[in-house]
Amino acid sequence: MKTQCFSLLALLLGSCAVGPDHVKPDVSDITPAKWRWKAAAPRDAAPKGEWWTVFKDRELNRLEAMAVAGNNDVRAAFARVNQARATANASVIAYVPSATANGAFKREQTSGRAPSPVPIAIPAALINTNSVALDLSYELDLWGRIRRSVESANADAEGSAADYQNVLLTLTGEVAADYFGVCAFDAELGVLRRTLDSREKSAGIIDQRFKAGVVPEVDAARAHSELASTRADVADLQRQRGELVAALSVLCGQPATTFNVGERPLSNNPPGIPSGIPADALERRPDIASAERKVASTNALIGVEKAGYFPAVRLTAEGGYLSKDASSLFGPKTDVWSFGPAVSLPITGYFVTKAKVARAKAVHEEALASYRQAVLSAVKDVETSLTQIHHRGLQSAAQTDAVTAANRATDLVRSRYEGGAVSYLELLDAERTSLALELQAAQVRAQRLIATVRLIKALGGTW
């Protein structure tokens, strides 16, 4: 009966854990009411798939696959996940007794002049000691120190996994944005090359008309000046494109010397965005999940430090064999053993424990503030991306109309110039306006696609 009562008492004591239990932070006060935000429940593990396939671009799909497989930041993040998981697995070992096997041989000589209460001469002697022992030690987790440590380590492992997903999401978003930037350069190069062809033909025609005395020399000089300027613009765009492709090679884990992206002017429109944002939209964001896991980890560490206020109880046991001769080590009457509990209670260390608890609480407050900041940043990212998508769409439509009108105006001015009604300077002004508008239109098309990429990233990899 006594044994049963003792077991029940041990079970009750073992079930308690000092320190606060983790409660998921409520951030409804800093999120839009229309989003119907609820207490954070990390859903970063929700399947996202290859989100970039919504753009239906085979070259983008190839680059994303290359980046996911070869990027070194992703490999490093995955290694950190394995480190955190190994740490979490190691923390669980504290639940079981620590066992150590020891074997030793010792040869020593005693002193013939050792102090003795009886004035008897004891001759010096050589002594051999052979021993084999098994040491066991087990800490009773009466106050939940071990459980809180395991809880913290598991939260850290989950947070590390979320960090890995965040690195992956950031990488794929950067690859898509850089790729569309390269496509924008390709579109601009297409415009400049058409302009270059046109100006080469115009310069040739004006040269012939100047030689015939039809136009003044200033028209010929201006024509060659615009031709050279366009060639310089083409060279500069090619430089910018090369630099962006080199940056893309690093993201894909490839050497820049052998990496190349074929010219692919922008052709596809961004995918449609469904209206409304679901309640769990931001819960898919891995950076928010990581921040929430950090809150849980630091909360558990408060309990670890608070356990220092209470006595630590350890059960220790040792058993084995001891003999002066190796041949009789496992013989009769050579076995030795010991068993007993050990209790330690901090006295002067009370103030140290108090400081550690205060520090753990401050770390938890920091993690909570960082979590709320992550949520605020996420809301800002989504709202910014939605605003950009909406206004970039309006801008693109207006830009297309402007390009159409400018090209029509250029054609009319060219006809009047050829008829001698206007100067060549007016024709150049009209052509410059058309060129600038076409280049802006290409940039706006790219920015629409990049804004969509940013929205997908802001929503955790999908919508």
Image: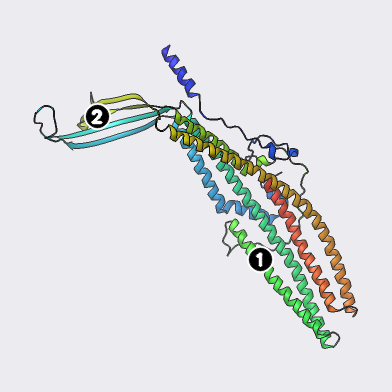
In the rendered structure, find residue 409 and report the number of the disc placed on it: none
Image quarter for residue 211? Answer: bottom right
Q: Residues within 10 Å of mark 2 (few under 14, many from 20)?
A: many
| Quadrant for the N terminus in the image | top left
| Quadrant for the C terminus in the image | top right
Q: Answer with left or right where residue 122 lies relative to residue 106.
A: left
Where is mark 1, residue-wise?
240
Mark closest to the chain's N terminus, 2 or 1: 1
Could you tell me how far apart the alpha carbons at marks 2 and 1 are, in whole angstroms?
Answer: 79 Å
Disc 2, SS: strand
Q: Answer with left or right where residue 104 lies relative to residue 459.
A: left
Disc 1, SS: helix
Q: Is residue 426 above or below residue 313?
A: below
Question: Residue sitting at 71 percent across and 48 percent down?
Answer: 455
Q: Amino acid at mark 2?
A: Leu
- Residue 226: % across, % down: 76, 76
Q: Answer with left or right where residue 358 lies relative to residue 64.
A: left
Q: Is residue 123 above or below residue 84?
A: above
- Residue 360: % across, % down: 51, 37
Q: Amino acid at mark 1?
A: Gln
Residue placed most toward the observer, 359 or 91: 359
Q: Residues within 10 Å of mark 1 (few under 14, many from 20)?
A: some
In the rendered structure, find residue 322 and report the number of the disc placed on it: 2
Q: Is residue 232 above or below residue 216?
A: above
- Residue 81: % across, % down: 53, 43
Question: Residue sitting at 70 percent across and 71 percent down?
Answer: 234
User: Marks 2 and 1: which is nearer the front?
Assistant: 1
Image quarter for residue 418? Answer: bottom right
Q: Mark yes or no: residue 285 visible.
A: no
Residue placed most toward the observer, 379 or 325: 379
Question: Residue sitting at 81 percent across and 72 percent down?
Answer: 431
- Residue 369: % across, % down: 60, 41
